[in-house]
Image: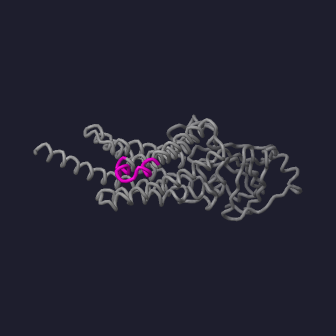
Amino acid sequence: VLQGMAEGAVLVDRGGRLTAAGIEARQAELPFAVRPRGHQVLLGDGDALWVRFTARALAQENHWLLEVDLPGVDEVSLHFRNAAGQWENQQAGDSLPQSVWPQRGRKPFLLLSQETGRDVTYFLRIQHERVPFSGGLFIKTQTVVAEQEQSALFLLGAYFGLAALAIAVALANALVYRDHGFSTYVIYVAAMVLGQAGMTGAGGLLFWPEWPGLSNPMTFLMNTFAGATGVLFVRTVATPRQYSTLLDRLAMGVIFALMVVSAVDVFVPTAAGFALSMHLLTLSMLLVLVLLALAMARGDRHSRWIAAGFGLIVLGGAFPVARNFGLISSGFLSEYGLMLGSALEMPLLFYGLNRRLNEQTESRARARAL
């Protein structure tokens, strides 16, 4: 029921000065090019990416939507002329409240023309700073979109439910036993959950729909903060100061640097600051693995569970980090890899902490008996 879909031709508008009407009038002379699959575009401050395509609806069996498959895209707008020759415009994106989106969602869904039997030329404008844009553009019916989003929200609900349970039980253990390992676990998981709410678009849809200003801090700040608290958690559990003062100081330095960079990035977001935070996050992942490997080498039996958990989070987090560096295109693993790794990591870390706590409790009981 939809035909005439042409490959999208793209144009990078440095400075973002072009309009849909201006592009339509000058499209023969503008340097449009076919966008290859997996193509990535790095947009600077104020730059815009224009995508032009043509489609024709043959029957009004369902509403057709254009899906911008990248939760967290800053702003997108769709422009086309209706049968009367007037422009119709729609806007969506993380920089706008959900109330102005044509259809509420985790990612932008823009309505295509419902007229049948007429070729319609669409102009899509995309703004997305600091992270290379490589999101897919798909035309789907409203029914297909609803089914896919229901499945996605079900999985996200399972993840957030698991995280809430882990936080509640760990917080109870931290308060009852005054255990610093469980205390840092609570902070780490909470930061990870908030970061995933921003990355997957669930936060903008469910938690702060009318406060778009929270989307970028939750996506960038909380993930950086999660990296810092992850190092703090491993430092608390593996206690590197027992065998290497240098490694302990390096861990504290990475924690401090991540905290400072994330705090500065909230107030002064820059491409350089974002790149620095990505390099520090990569360093923190490697440092965590080194600390856990040394702890296991020294005979810490519980560190292997924590190492297994962090191994999964490093594996899952490698995909969004690689996307942010422009090494891979956006896709399922770059969007959900960190969340899947986090979901598998939480019970492993909890089990390792619980065994560690039981051993410490037994040791204290034996000491009191003696």
Q: Measuring 73% from the left and 48% from the top, which residue is drawn there?
A: 125
Of the pair 305 and 46, the residue shown nearer to us: 305
Q: What colour scheme was applied to this rendering of the protein?
A: one colour
Residue 358 placed where, x, y %?
22, 50
Q: Measuring 72% from the left and 44% from the top, which residue is drawn there?
A: 45
Q: Quadrant of the N terminus?
A: bottom right
Q: Is residue 317 above or below residue 165?
A: below
Q: Quadrant of the C terminus?
A: top left
Q: Is residue 344 above or below residue 81?
A: below
Q: Quadrant of residue 264?
A: top right
Q: Residue furthest bottom?
A: 36
Residue 266 placed where, x, y %?
59, 38
Taking the image as shown, residue 320 lies to the left or right of residue 182, namely: right
Q: Measuring 61% from the left and 42% from the top, which residue is drawn there?
A: 94
Of the pair 318 and 367, the residue shown nearer to us: 367
Q: Is residue 224 visible?
A: yes
Confirm whether the magenta stretch covers residue 152: no
Q: Is residue 230 above or below residue 214?
A: below
**Total numbered labels:** 0
Q: Is residue 138 visible?
A: no
Of the pair 339 and 61, the residue shown nearer to us: 339
Which range of residues does the magenta coloring cover? 236-249
Taking the image as shown, residue 129 lies to the left or right of residue 193, namely: right
Taking the image as shown, residue 192 lies to the left or right of residue 236, namely: right
Taking the image as shown, residue 303 lies to the left or right of residue 6, namely: left
Secondary structure that dominates the magenta span: helix
Residue 17 placed where, x, y %?
81, 43
Of the pair 163 and 76, the residue shown nearer to us: 163
